[in-house]
Image (cartoon, rainbow, N blue to C red):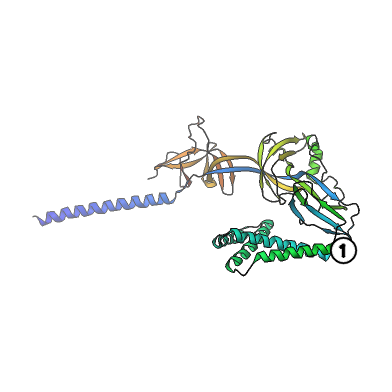
Amino acid sequence: MDLTYIKKIGSYVLVTLLALALIASLVYHSFRKLTSDLELTFLTLETHLNTVEMSAFMLTSEKALEYPQYTNGMVIDHPMGDRSLVSVGDTVAGVYSDSVDKSLVVRLDDARRRLEFYEAVALCVARQSVDSISEKIRKCEKSISETDDLGRLAELRSELKVLLSAHSAKMDASVGYTELIKECQSEISSLNAELGIAKKKFTSDLNGGYFSSCDGYEGIVSSGELESADFSLLRDLVNGKLDPKSTDKSIGKLVDMNTWKLVCLTDKQSSLRLFDGTKVNVTLGNSGSVYKLTVERVIAERNSDDAVIILSCGQMISCDDYAHFQNVFVELESKEGYKIPIDAVRYENGIAGVFVLRGSKVIYRRIEIVGGGDGYVIASANLKNDGSGISPLNRYDRVIVRGHDLYDGKVIV
């Protein structure tokens, strides 16, 4: 065999392989540069809530408890505490003469708080396993580290104290809360006997809430008056401009927590999206609880930028929910849509859209922005073809967040 010929063939093969390797390298680096310029994201469906914060006055059926002979020197005992849910027949307050030792009421309050704590721990011990309590402790500690709400923080710390005590009782059988409860109950009975008979006792005549203090706005406007009250009166009510009643002789108040209304002050533009008879979700600013309320009235004046919305609810609220004056968050509407980084949004010939990658081809998709937040927009998930020739965004499109020299129809190698 001719060795020279073989060498020549080998050199041709080698040159060919080197050329192919060079071409492959150029293609690889070119593709790598192009793809490194592309940042893609998959679409996720989210519900966008459009909420408006409003100042509000909470109106309930309530009555102040008054004692005509009440003076600041008299001693008042609140067996149910400063605020609590009560039933018909519960004693909510007792008035004693100023000759009674005031420290007895202080000691009674302390004993009642201890009894409430002991009973909560005993209930936890009886119903929960050690593992269950340990898991709740971890969750409670995590929630404490994450919350900035001072009211919620106090609740979580109280809960943690109960859980830690219950865990200790589970681990040490010598810790008996049954005996502590009996001792506390005996202490309360002794203090009550020493306190003697009250000059006047107040009992609840309804199933609702008791509050030991009044702010003077109890019954300042009746539920019936709201049906015909004018804009000016309702605005003054929400802004606290109506003169409150004297509370000098007040022992507290009883509140029907089962039916209530909110008189809300908002801007006229927001009020146009609320209609009589519709139901809306409302978050109470005092507690963060969410309730569904019915729109009763929408009142506005031609020469004012404000409007008043009256909402009603028949769902029982807790004592933490109650407050005459508070800010509330009213959900005007909710829309389902795609969450898209704001950097991906482009405008082509005045049409909002995004570039997507289908295979290796760049395609422009039309979108309708229905909401947004910090660094993102919400695009409608129900956009239809409008005859413009630009297809709407599809659920399974891969959106290009970042890319170089993008245009409709560009092919990415």
- Residue 225's place in the image compared with 185, above or below, is above
Q: Mark 1 Cα within 10 Å, few/some/many (few <14, many 20+)?
A: some
What amino acid is labelled 1 in the image? Val
Q: Which residue is mark 1?
A: 100
Q: Is residue 234 above or below residue 386?
A: below
Which residue: 81% across, 43% down? Answer: 236
Expressed as whole percent of the image width and height from the top left, the position of residue 340 reads: 52, 45
Q: Quadrant of residue 239?
A: top right
Element under disc 1: loop
Find residue 326 and report its horizontal and vertical position in percent.
74, 48
Q: Is residue 386 visible?
A: yes
Query: Residue 214, can we see it?
Result: no
Query: Which quadrant does the C terminus fall into?
Result: top left
**How many discs appear?**
1
Q: Is residue 281 left or right of residue 409?
A: right
Q: In percent of the image, x 69 and y 51: which residue is there?
A: 287
Location of residue 139 (image quadrant): bottom right
From the top left corner, tell me how far across and down residue 312 is, in percent.
Answer: 72, 39
Q: Nearer the viewer, residue 371 or 275?
A: 275
Residue projecting furthest to the left: 1
Given the current orientation, which residue lies at the most extreme top position? 387
For the N terminus, the quadrant is bottom left
Query: Which residue reaches farthest right?
Result: 69
Given residues 196 and 212, the one toward you in this image is 196
Q: As rendered, which of 213 and 220 lies closer to the eye?
A: 213
In the image, is 411 to the left or to the right of 291?
A: left
Identity of the residue drawn at 30% across and 53% down = 22
Place of residue 379 in the rendered image (x, y in percent of width and height, measured from the top left): 54, 40
